Image (cartoon, rainbow, N blue to C red):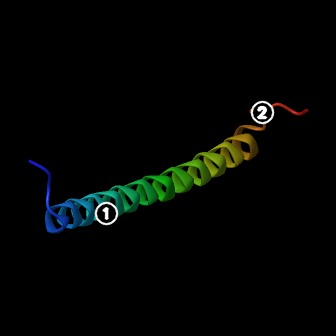
Amino acid sequence: MPKSKDQKLLELEQKVLLLEKQKKELEKKVEQADKKAIFFDMMIDIAEKEFKIPIRKKY
């Protein structure tokens, strides 16, 4: 039996809500990854200064 327009609309609205939730979660993960990268970069800078050893490769 084919779905009514109301059923299709309701399903699409649910999909939109799910996609918006997934988008929000992914944006949060990206923000956390950016913060983590900055933190690791700072740790390398501190280690290079404190121990006077080159950690990063110079190209």
In the rendered image, the quadrant that contains the C terminus is top right
Residue 36: horizontal and vertical position, in percent?
52, 50
Which residue lies at the image location 14% right of the left edge and 51% below the top edge?
2
Please give the label number shown on residue 40.
none
Up the image or down, 56 lies above or below 3; here it is above
Q: Of helix, strand and loop, which one carries label 2?
A: loop
Q: Tell me if mark 2 has few (under 14), some (14-19) or many (20+) residues whose alpha carbon lies within 10 angstroms of its own.
A: few
In the image as oriented, which residue stretches furthest toward the right?
59
Residue 16: horizontal and vertical position, in percent?
31, 63
Residue marked by disc 1: 16
Of discs 2 and 1, which sits in the foreground?
1
Q: Tell me if mark 1 has few (under 14), some (14-19) or many (20+) residues whose alpha carbon lies within 10 angstroms of its own.
A: few
Which residue lies at the image location 57% right of the left edge and 52% below the top edge?
39
- Tag 2–tag 1 contact (CB < 8 Å): no
Up the image or down, 35 lies above or below 1; here it is below
Please give the label number shown on residue 53.
2
Three-letter amino acid code at disc 1? Val
Residue 15: horizontal and vertical position, in percent?
27, 58
Q: Is 16 left or right of 2, judged from the image as shown? A: right
Which residue lies at the image location 50% right of the left edge and 54% below the top edge?
30
Three-letter amino acid code at disc 2? Ile
Given residues 27 and 59, the one toward you in this image is 27
Q: Is 16 left or right of 59, judged from the image as shown? A: left
Image quadrant assignment for residue 48: top right
